[in-house]
Structure formats: structure tokens, C-alpha cells
Image (spheres, rainbow, N blue to C red):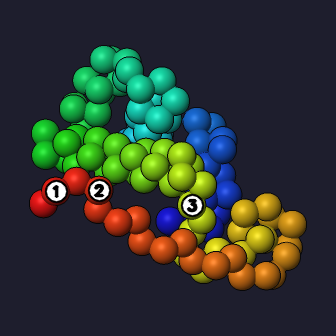
Amino acid sequence: MQKEKFAALANYTNSPLFSDLERLVVRYAEEMTEKVQVDSRLVEELKKQLSPEAVVQLTLSIAAANFTNRFNEALGTELEGATDADRSGAGASRRIPAVPSVPTVWPL
């Protein structure tokens, strides 16, 4: 994603940098993340512009990101190699230790 687009993401609904499809995709991601239940009209709009496979892939990508974020938040994990500045935006440069891998807890 271009830096300009990333910076405009908070105002995607009004930014000329985003296409109509991109606005739908961001709105879909927001609804999946914040509300969980997605407005059926939004899904229908996506289905008009994307193939069934693309809608499934989009949904899977958003769900996987949500899963990862919730998992990491619940365990208080940090991004490997992240700095205090990454977390707080304060400009600190101390490296945060990487979190070790989480062992498998179910039988394989």
C-alpha cells in the first residue's frame, strides 16, 4: 500500500485515493472486526464486484488477521523485533525481546 493511502486510511470514506471497491473492502474489514455481523447489503455489494472465490479469500484474510490480533492481544505477545517506538509512537529505539513460539497444546 502506498504511504499516502495508508495515511489516508482513517478517512477512506472521503479520500479520493480509494476506489469504490477499496472502500467496500475496508468497510467489510471494519464490520468483520468491530461488529462481527456484517450487513448483508455490504456482502451483496462485494459479490457484485468480486468473484465468489475472491469474497472467500477476502473474508479468510480478514478473519485470519483478526484471529492473530486477538490471540496476540490475549497473551500479551509483542511483534518480533518491534521497538518501543513501534508500540507507543514515542520515538524510543530500545528493542523489545522476541516472544518465543507458543507450543502446540493439542495432540497431533
- Which disc, if any, is residue 105? 2
Residue 79's place in the image compared with 14, above or below, is below
Name the residue nearer the viewer: 2 or 33: 33
Residue at figure coordinates x 85%, y 73% from the top left: 91
Q: Which amino acid does label 2 sit on?
A: Val
Q: Which amino acid does label 3 sit on?
A: Thr
Question: In the structure shown, which secondary structural element does the residue marked by tag 3 occupy?
Answer: loop
Residue at figure coordinates x 39%, y 46% from the top left: 67
Q: Which amino acid does label 1 sit on?
A: Pro
Expressed as whole percent of the image width and height from the top left, the position of residue 56 reads: 19, 42
Q: Mark 3 Cα within 10 Å, few/some/many (few <14, many 20+)?
A: few
Residue at figure coordinates x 66%, y 44% from the top left: 10
Depth-wise, is mark 3 or mark 2 nearer the camera?
2
Expressed as whole percent of the image width and height from the top left, the position of residue 53 reads: 13, 46
Does the rendering let one see residue 82?
A: yes
Question: If the image is split into quadrants, where does the C terminus sit?
Answer: bottom left
- What residue sits right under mark 1 in the picture? 107
Depth-wise, is mark 1 or mark 3 nearer the camera?
1
Residue 67's place in the image compared with 104, above or below, is above
Q: Mark 1 Cα within 10 Å, few/some/many (few <14, many 20+)?
A: few
Expressed as whole percent of the image width and height from the top left, the position of residue 70 reads: 48, 45
Mark pair 3, 2: CA separation = 17 Å
- Which disc, if any, is residue 12? none
The tag earlier along the polypeptide, 1 or 3, is: 3
Residue at figure coordinates x 72%, y 82% from the top left: 95
- What residue sits right under mark 3 in the picture? 77
Mark pair 2, 1: CA separation = 7 Å
Question: In the structure shown, which secondary structural element does the residue marked by tag 1 occupy?
Answer: loop
The tag earlier along the polypeptide, 3 or 2, is: 3
Question: In the structure shown, which secondary structural element does the residue marked by tag 2 occupy?
Answer: loop
